[in-house]
Image: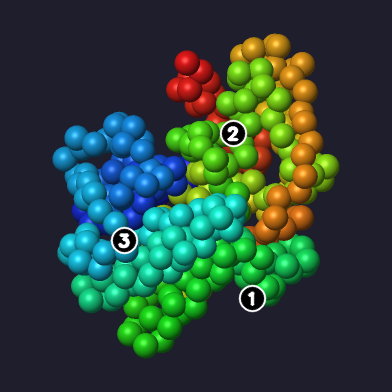
């Protein structure tokens, strides 16, 4: 983690939507450790109560069980809030292809509800989870914030619409916003189960069971895999930055390096084998490419470094090692 002074946000009231999810629960835990007052809004559609167990009884923590598709719930959650960290969304490209209507209801209508609620109570800053999927069919590497392509999935469309709405709410109503384009976030508390599980926890669980994971395609597709602590750092910086040029912008939230899927499985096997040597012998299976997937993703983080003093704390190998330590301790049985 970054060297972050508690005085920056101690006593502030911060709403984390989707606070029972992977990223949201990590944010809640960090904010509580910094003496902030944290409100978690979640409908538990994809979040989990066990993600809140470590701090559910903390005196500065409040849980509101509700849905961002309901405007009154959003207004209730925003009452008296200084900052909003909006993490609530239906993720996954395949999910959006299978059910574009629900993805749009949550990711667009729900997002708009949150903007309206934040505007009406006068929050200081609205920070939201944007997505690297916004780069679409742009083949340029590394990805820079002001050059995007055409979206390749309904999910990508919803996340780009979020950026457009955030910009309009600043221009029309003076609401300060910062969007963080997350690049393949992974780490502790990430759900390995379900049809839309992210690749790293899913592969970890399969290796632990001595099952062969399936790589979509030949394994040369690459991603800028980003450890959760880098994401937490960016959210904290987005809240406390006093650089006027940094606000009402969108930032890549990544490491600035890429790893292909073959390299990823090798890393996973390397560190998992320290716990169970048999995992080194588990084979990997190759299947067809997945519709809507971009071949390569690599972020430039120069804008965040320049305007918000962002310094990634974990590269892929550091993050994988820490993540596997957590998975082995918490999910082996």
Instruction: Say which element carries label 3.
Output: loop
Give the Cα separation between the discs numbered 2 and 1: 33 Å
Q: Which mark is residue 156?
A: none
Which of the two residues, 2 or 224, is positioned nearer the viewer here? 224
Q: Is residue 333 above or below residue 109?
A: above
177 over 333 or under it: above or below = below
Q: Which residue is mark 3?
A: 68
Q: How is the structure coloured here?
A: rainbow
How far apart are the two marked residues, 2 and 3, measured between alpha carbons? Answer: 28 Å
Of the two numbered discs 2 and 3 on the same chain, state the one appearing first in sequence.
Answer: 3
Q: How many marks?
A: 3
* Labelled pair 3, 1 in contact (Cβ < 8 Å): no
Dot 1 crowding, Cα within 10 Å, few <14, some 14–19, many 20+: few
| Coordinates of residue 257 in the picture (x, y in percent) | 71, 50
Image point 74% across, 69% down: which residue? 138
* Label 2 close to label 3 by CB (< 8 Å): no
- The answer to whether residue 22 is left or right of residue 34 is right
Q: Which residue is mark 2?
A: 202
Which residue is more in the foreground, 167 or 242?
167
Q: Which residue is mark 1?
A: 146
For residue 310, side relative to residue 111 (left or right): right
Question: In the image, what residue occupies the spot 59% across and 33% down?
Answer: 202
Q: Residues within 10 Å of mark 3 (few under 14, many from 20)?
A: many
Q: Position of residue 15 (x, y in %)?
A: 28, 57
Pointer 3 or 1: first along the chain: 3
Which is closer to the viewer, label 2 or label 1? Answer: 2
């Amino acid at each position: 983690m970054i060297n972050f002074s508690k005085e920056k946000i101690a006593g502030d009231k911060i709403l984390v939507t989707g606070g029972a999810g992977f990223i949201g629960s990590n944010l809640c835990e960090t904010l509580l450790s910094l003496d902030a007052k944290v409100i978690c809004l979640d409908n538990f559609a994809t979040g989990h109560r066990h993600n809140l167990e470590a701090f559910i009884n903390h005196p500065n923590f409040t849980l509101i069980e509700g849905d961002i598709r309901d405007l009154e719930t959003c207004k209730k959650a925003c009452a008296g809030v200084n900052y909003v960290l909006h993490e609530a969304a239906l993720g996954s490209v395949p999910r959006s292809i299978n059910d574009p209507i629900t993805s749009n209801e949550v990711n667009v209508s729900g997002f708009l509800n949150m903007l309206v609620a934040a505007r009406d109570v006068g929050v200081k800053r609205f920070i939201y989870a944007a997505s690297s999927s916004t780069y679409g069919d742009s083949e340029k590497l590394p990805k820079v914030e002001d050059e995007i392509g055409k979206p390749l999935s309904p999910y990508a469309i919803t996340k780009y619409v979020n950026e457009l709405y955030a910009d309009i709410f600043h221009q029309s109503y003076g609401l300060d916003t910062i969007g963080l384009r997350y690049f393949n976030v992974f780490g502790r508390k990430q759900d390995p189960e379900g049809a839309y599980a992210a690749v790293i926890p899913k592969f970890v669980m399969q290796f632990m069971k001595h099952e062969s994971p399936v790589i979509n395609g030949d394994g040369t597709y690459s991603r800028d895999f980003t450890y959760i602590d880098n994401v937490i750092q960016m959210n904290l910086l987005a809240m406390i930055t006093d650089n006027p040029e940094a606000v009402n912008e969108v930032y890549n939230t990544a490491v600035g390096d890429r790893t292909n899927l073959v390299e990823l499985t090798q890393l996973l096997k390397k560190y998992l084998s320290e716990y169970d040597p048999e995992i080194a012998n588990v084979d990997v299976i190759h299947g067809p490419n997945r519709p809507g997937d971009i071949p390569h993703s690599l972020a430039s983080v120069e804008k965040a470094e320049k305007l918000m003093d962002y310094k990634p704390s974990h590269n892929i190998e550091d993050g994988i090692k820490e993540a596997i330590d957590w998975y082995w301790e918490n999910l082996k049985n």
